[in-house]
Amino acid sequence: MTTPTYVQHKVATPFGSLDVRDFPGAGDPFVLLHGFPDDSTIYNKLVPELHQRRVVTFDYVGYGQSERVRGASVVEGQRLKETAAVIDQLNLEKVVIVGHDAGGPVAVEYAAAHPDRVARMVLLNCYFGESPTLRFPEMIRLLGDPHLVPLADALMQDPAQRKWLLEHTARQFGYAPTDDIREMSIIPQFFGSAAQPDSLEAIRAWTGRLFADIALTNEVIASGTLATLRCPVDVVFGANDPYLNAGVAEHLASLFPNAQRHSIEARHWVQWDEPKALAGVLMRAD
């Protein structure tokens, strides 16, 4: 897997500095957002397929190559502000914003807050608010439940239990323990690597906001704000995700006046499982 040439930036935010990769190209840039358990490397197979297009990827504070701030929590709106900082400091006038997993709600929030800056929004196996078929992975529910914080902390602090939880969750998603995306993007967040420290504090802080953030997104839906968004929205889901499933995709598409649904034979990380198919949708729709 050959990584295209990119310019590396460090973007300052009030929460810490972000590591940003800016792949040169033409057109409105794709800004790719990651979620809870991984980092921007989940897009490593997709970027080469977006030929001659400008692409921006980055790690949120506490993840990947971005700054670790010891003892920091994730405050309301933080990921939105980090995203806005990247777009502003790179002077991106208009973007195609792409959100996966917990990055999906951030993409929606950015489009709602800055509708004039979003040419198109793409939502990949993510969620926004409650929907009838939404199921969170059991590990994420555990980390997000405020009543189970002592148990979740104890399990995360024990490397053997942490490893078991990750392997159990991988099986639930249909990924083998040795699958390359786990080795590249997930294991380093939970155990660190030669290239980066672990992201346990950031994972605990962000997942700890899960249900509070869902309540906030329910309020956004109830306000009618999303129904006023005029940008095209592509809801592109891997069809074989047992948690963020077709029913969730249908619910997402129903929130926007100009949305299309696309289904790809893939699992949760559609951008890793089927990068060519996803790139075809992104480039064809643009």
Image (cartoon, grey):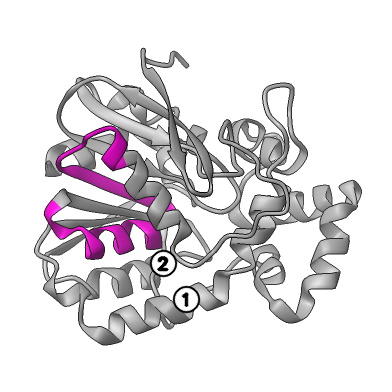
The quarter of the picture where residue 133 lies is: bottom left
What numbered label is drawn on residue 127?
2
Q: Residue at x 67, y 22 (%)?
A: 195
Whether residue 273 is visible to the viewer of this picture, yes or no, is no
Residue 225, numbered circle: none
Picture coordinates of residue 96, whole percent (x, y): 21, 44
- What residue is shown with label 1? 214
Q: Nearer the viewer, residue 36 or 9?
A: 9
**How far across and how far down the image is residue 161, in percent?**
87, 54
Q: Residues within 10 Å of mark 1 (few under 14, many from 20)?
A: some
Residue 2 x, y percent position in the rendering:
44, 13
Look at the image and say whether residue 85 sits in the magenta stretch: no
Q: Secondary structure at mark 2?
A: loop
Q: Is residue 44 left or right of residue 206?
A: left
Q: Position of residue 210 (x, y in %)?
A: 56, 70
Q: Amino acid at mark 1?
A: Ile
Relative vertical location of residue 130 with respect to residue 273 in this rendering, above or below = below
Ranked by sequence position, the earlier of labels 2 and 1 is 2
Q: Quadrant of residue 230?
A: bottom left
Could you tell me which residue is drawn at 39 percent across and 76 percent down? Answer: 217
Name the amino acid type tagged 2: Tyr
Residue pictured at 64% horizontal, 51% vertical: 202
* Residue 221 versus residue 25 in the image, above or below: below
Q: Which residues are magenta?
A: 87-116
104 part of magenta stretch: yes
Left or right: 154, with 278 as reference point: right
Choose between 169 and 217: the one closer to the eye.
217
Q: Secondary structure at mark 1?
A: helix
Dot 2 and dot 1 residues touching (CB under 8 Å): yes
At x 37%, y 48%, the residue is: 83
Q: Is residue 243 left or right of residue 186?
A: left
Q: Quadrant of the C terminus?
A: top left
